[in-house]
Image: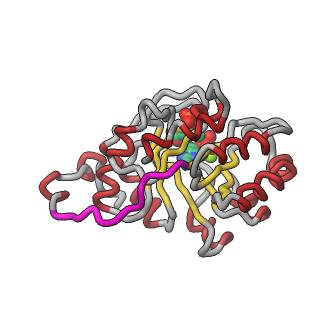
Amino acid sequence: MTDFTEEELALDPHFADQFDRGFRPACQLYLISPPSIGEDFVDRLAEAFDGGRVAAFQLRLKGIDDHAIAALAGPIQALCAEREVAFIVNDSIGLAKRLGADGVHLGQGDGDPREARKVLGPKVQIGVTCHDSRHLAMEAGEAGADYVAFGAFYPTATKETTHRPDPSILSWWTTLFELPCVAIGGITPQNAAPLVAAGADFLAVSGAVWNHPDGPKAGVAAFGAVLG
Ligand SMILES: Cc1ncc(COP(=O)(O)OP(=O)(O)O)c(N)n1
Ligand SMILES: Cc1nc(C(=O)O)sc1CCOP(=O)(O)O
Ligand SMILES: [Mg+2]
């Protein structure tokens, strides 16, 4: 796979016509935590869950160590279990193991999906950041990832980003592969439609929910119309 350039991996539309997109469930919401949280966060999360169906929640806390995250995680993880929302830990295979999380999200510098699988076993979901790269996505799939994440599709204040994929990477992916794909980065109810139309299996969203002027319940509810 390392022998191909990004251009060579681009989908030939005539070739794509030969594939059936097959059955894929409707696009779902994957909620990402704010980078830092206060003591009332579990209440805000419950409010967010009251706004509509959230398939997965990622605890993405920056600037604190795994021990501090573990100390905060208990009630959040319990709420996710109660609401049947998958609880995903960001960055750390060790923390995901320690907490018994439903999944871990790995950036390109966060560890090897094969190692994560060895440590976490077959049932834990492993997600991998692939930026705007078809090549990274295929590598992640081969390494046993359960989903690939492309982004940042739009400007975002949540994180410094350097990659800006075109939504067509989602249609390319979903035409060729069954493995779910996640779209992330600056997604709002107003700009999400092209990503859903291009085939995103999940929209990963932080700011549009947590910074919604009417609160996180309204933030989640606002995605209802675009997700259907
Ligand atoms: C669903 C999802 N996609 C991408 C990322 C980004 O992960 P990473 O590149 O490791 O950056 P940080 O989130 O760790 O800053 C993600 N967390 N979740
Ligand atoms: C955590 C993260 N990863 C990104 C990537 O491009 O890999 S963009 C991003 C920020 C997501 O938050 P918001 O919905 O507020 O933009
Ligand atoms: Mg990371």
Q: Is residue 196 left or right of residue 38?
A: left
Residue 169 at x, y percent in the picture: 33, 46
Q: Main secondary structure of the magenta part?
A: loop
Q: Quadrant of ligand 2?
A: top right
Q: Quadrant of residue 113?
A: bottom right
Residue 116 at x, y percent in the picture: 63, 65
Q: Quadrant of residue 21?
A: bottom left
Q: Identify the residue at image location x=16%, y=51%.
A: 13
Magenta stretch contains residue 26:
yes
Q: Identify the residue at image location x=68%, y=44%.
A: 60
Q: Identify the residue at image location x=37%, y=62%.
A: 24
Residue 64 at x, y percent in the picture: 80, 41
In this view, the residue in front, 11 or 18, is 18
In this view, the residue in front, 214 or 107, is 214
Q: Is residue 108 left or right of residue 201?
A: right
Compared to 177, does 222 lie above or below?
above
Magenta stretch contains residue 23:
yes
Compared to 153, does 59 lie above or below?
below
Residue range of the region highlighted in magenta in the rendering: 18-29
**In the rendered view, how is the structure colored?**
secondary structure
In this view, the residue in front, 24 or 135, is 24
